[in-house]
Amino acid sequence: MNCKELVKEVTRLLDEFQEDKQCIDEFTQEAVKDLKNLSSADQDFIIDTLYGCITHKRFLEVVVNIFYIHYGDILLRVDRNLFIVVCYLAIFCLDDLGMEHFSRIIKSLDASKMHKFLSFFFSANNLTTHIQEEWSHIYDAAIVKSNWITPLIRWCSEIDLLLDQLAKKMGKGSLPKKSSRKSTEPREFDLTKPKVRPLPAPEVIPKQDKPKPVPASTHRSPKEPEILDEIKQSNQKKALEVLNEANSQQFKCANPQKSKKTQNVISQILQSRDGELKFDKLYASGSPATQKTNSLPVRLNTTAILREGALYNRQLEEELKRLEHLSQGASEPSAYLQWQKEMREKDLQEELAELERRRLEGRISHEEAVLARERVLERNHHKAQQTKEETAELMHRYAEKRLQEEKEMRDLVQQVADGHKNSKAAKAKLQQIKQRIVKEVSEQNRELLSQALEDAQAELRRKMELICQIRAFESMPMVRQKLVDDTEPAGHDLLCEMSLAELRERLTLLRESEMCKLEERRQRILEEKQVKEQLLLEQLDNIALRRSLAEQATARSQEEKRLRSELRQAVNKDERVLALQKTLQQKQQEKHKRKTEKNSMKRNELVRPLTVKNSIQKKQQVFEEHHWQELERTLEQQVHGVFHQSSKTK
């Protein structure tokens, strides 16, 4: 075989291999059987390459995965195992094959694919960065560099010649060689000993400002006692004046007239009552239009009044337009409307008769469908009865078969009981195994407990150190002096910063402006309410007029309904409708008759399964009694055998 066929054979076998289901050795042995027609050298090459690709699959997939990530979706996933084979030959077999034989294998394959893969793989930039980093996760970094990276870099110059030949084969000409860059070798850090930190300089103690003098208002006596003294003096003066007035007018109590105080109280009560009765004065504008009352029998809300008023206005406009057309010479369509009404009544009568006929025909077809369904159910019931009889026969045969199997099982149980007489040695051996397992588990628990104790002690030490640090922070002194001045800002350096006094002044101005706006809004709402009330009263008059007209229209509509009921009575007297009603009654009688026959058949069928069921239950009871007697007999035989053996040993 030539080189191309050998590589294809290896790729095919690698595609067939399933790592989670097959073993490498068994798979290679089966592959050797399929390769009997080839020479021994070809067989050795295929088997060695296949075995190497499977064992180093994880190592080789690193290169292929990076290669597919670099080129994206340009390459097909079918050629994945082909690139794995070529990668294995380049890494592990290049020294043994030689450059001549390796180039012959590469040239026999697809030139464009091999050119892409080899130019990517033997690039010094890719080898020393991505690929070396991923290989270092699998093996030690020193081993990766000495065993694979360094030999592959040595072959780069010869691989470049092979790439030029592949490029000529593709028709692109010789590609410019890439200058091989030297890989950077890491150097150790030259760490010097850190310098000893100098002692921190002591902080300068800030000088405190001179305290402000105490204001005069602090030691001033309060004003409340002075105010109380003034109130007390004024009350004494009033009491003296009242006493003098009472002494001077001591006979005025006999006067029947009411005092001024009583008259003032009575006038206040009367004014409050008048104010309660005149609660609508606030919203009245004084015009006679707004002093109208609601003459409707039902109270309506605002939305209903406006909606009904708009409807009546629209109807009024339509009536005015009709009268205008009549005044301009248009004819009154009363004769045409009368003829149209008569024709509509005639069409309605015919349509009602047709609808009644269709309804009766639908009922008749429904009854026929019910009868047909009952016939189908009777046939199915007959078939089901036959299948039930067959299943009863099969169950009888199955019960007999189960009796035979139970007898065979009893014989097997007897044989097994005879073979388990000498089981004491096995129990002792099992006990020893359990004791050994318990001992091993206790040792493992002891080790785990010691490890947990060490972890707890380390955690406790860490917490103690943290507590010491927190206490050291808490022991530091803190300056808690705080002086507040309402006229000075807080000093946060904000654009909108202001003092407390300025803030209070701004809030008062804002509150006054809001009160002004609220008062304006209240006045505007009051005016709107007055306009709205006037509009509603006008609409109520219009609604009362229109409702009287609507009552007349309802009277006319009731007359039309009476005429329609007379039309329906005429439809029910139609001969075709009567004939269809008669056929419907016949179908319903036939359905009722079949239903009674079906119920009688069901009662007869319920009697038969009860007899079959009773016979099966009797057979099962006989079988169970026989089974328990056999078990008791075998237990007695075993007890007698054990008793005889114990007597012999004694």
Image (spheres, helix red, strand yellow):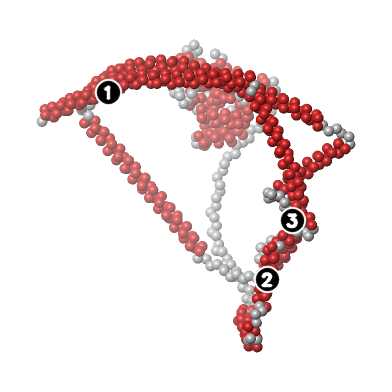
Task: Name which quarter of the figure residue 236 lies in.
Answer: bottom right
* Residue 498 coordinates in the image, percent (x, y): 69, 65
Callout 2 secondary element: helix
Mark 3 sits on what residue? 529
Going 71% across and 49% down the picture, which residue do you hit?
A: 296
Label 1, residues with CA under 10 Å away: few <14, some 14-19, many ≥20: few
Badge nearest the viewer, 1 or 3: 3
The amino acid on which the numbered mark 2 sits, given as a three-letter code, is: Gln
Badge nearest the viewer, 3 or 2: 2
The N terminus: image quadrant: top right
Label 2, residues with CA under 10 Å away: few <14, some 14-19, many ≥20: few
| Numbered label attached to residue 136 | none
Mark 2 sits on what residue? 268
* Residue 324 coordinates in the image, percent (x, y): 86, 39
Mark 1 sits on what residue? 621
Callout 1 secondary element: helix
* Of residues 417 and 514, the one drawn nearer to the viewer in this rendering: 514
Callout 3 secondary element: helix
* Residue 628 coordinates in the image, percent (x, y): 24, 25
The amino acid on which the numbered mark 3 sits, given as a three-letter code, is: Lys
Is the residue under label 3 in contact with that under label 1 (CB below 8 Å)? no
Badge nearest the viewer, 2 or 1: 2
The amino acid on which the numbered mark 1 sits, given as a three-letter code, is: Gln
Going 62% across and 76% down the picture, which residue do you hit?
A: 211
